[in-house]
């Protein structure tokens, strides 16, 4: 817990709060404006509003923010031998990696809650006749959980790549390509390796009629678990090499 608090303290000196506040607000604003000017076509009120606000947020902003947070979390360690200092501490390699991942994931969870609050606030001002779909909260929670794969991937990239911008750029590429991979039908098993994007795409195109059977859920969380474990192990092994 002390290591987790120390990681959060490091981030306080950055201006991370600015994109965390502005990017969801930008996605909501753009989506709300687009919905307002296309009400004749978008007739499902809350659901139509969701398709407008979530498309760019899920495909671009959210993956980008994962990359940004991960890059910032490791940025201090790449400066002034910070990585050597943390490796010489009393913490284990597993504790170091776990604390980084927990910080990234906790900030992302807060980001998703903030995004949902903005969505429901905007929808309430539009005086829809239909009831607000609060089951979106559970679905977005599942998306967040499945995004642990990208969290671990971006942490690995930011650990290995000292340049701050490259992992963030790769996060944008990941967001775009993962959505494209989930939209294609030629490789039907590939989307299960990209669970967060697959579920995000379903939320945008199929909600509230999203249907996954037990086998599909097993694939989504099975692959997410395997990939996360592999990426965490790669990070731990890399830290071990640095001490030799």
Image: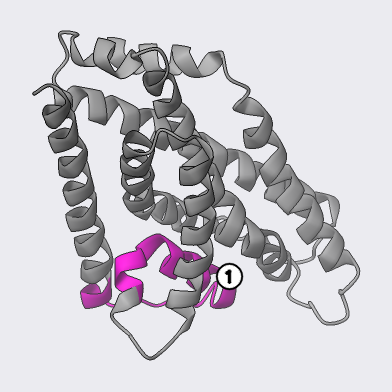
112 displayed left or right of 71: right
Q: Residue furthest bottom?
A: 186
Residue 110, percent across and down? 52, 34
Q: Nearer the viewer, residue 173 or 136?
A: 173
Q: Nearer the viewer, residue 197 or 75?
A: 75
Here the colouring is one colour
Name the residue tied to disc 1. 204
Residue 127 picture quarter = bottom right
Residue 104, percent across and down? 41, 34
User: In this picture, which residue range is highlighted in magenta?
Assistant: 191-216
- Split into 4 quadrants, where in the image is the N terminus? top left
- Secondary structure mainly formed by the magenta segment: helix
Observer able to see residue 204: yes
8 displayed left or right of 146: right
Give above or below for 187 relative to 173: below
Observer able to see residue 135: no
Give above or below for 91 relative to 141: above
229 displayed left or right of 198: left
- Secondary element under disc 1, as helix, strand or loop, is helix
């Amino acid at each position: 817990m002390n290591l987790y608090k120390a990681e959060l303290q490091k981030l306080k000196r950055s201006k991370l709060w600015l994109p965390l506040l502005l990017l969801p607000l930008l996605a909501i604003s753009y989506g709300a404006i687009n919905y307002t000017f296309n009400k004749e076509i978008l007739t499902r009120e809350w659901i139509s509003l969701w398709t407008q606000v979530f498309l760019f947020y899920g495909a671009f902003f959210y993956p980008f923010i994962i990359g940004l947070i991960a890059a910032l979390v490791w940025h201090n360690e790449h400066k002034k031998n910070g990585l050597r200092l943390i490796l010489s501490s009393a913490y284990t390699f597993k504790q170091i990696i776990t604390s980084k991942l927990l910080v990234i994931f906790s900030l992302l969870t807060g980001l998703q809650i903030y995004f949902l609050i903005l969505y429901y606030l905007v929808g309430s001002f539009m005086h829809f006749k239909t009831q607000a779909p609060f089951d979106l909260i559970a679905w977005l929670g599942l998306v967040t959980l499945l995004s642990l794969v990208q969290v671990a991937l971006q942490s690995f990239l930011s650990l290995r790549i000292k340049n701050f911008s490259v992992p963030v750029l790769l996060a944008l590429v990941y967001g775009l390509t993962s959505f494209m991979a989930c939209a294609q039908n030629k490789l039907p098993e590939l989307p299960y390796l990209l669970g967060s994007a697959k579920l995000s795409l379903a939320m945008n195109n199929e909600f509230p009629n999203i249907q996954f059977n037990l086998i599909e859920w097993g694939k989504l969380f099975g692959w997410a678990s395997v990939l996360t474990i592999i990426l965490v192990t790669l990070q731990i092994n890399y830290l071990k090499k640095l001490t030799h």
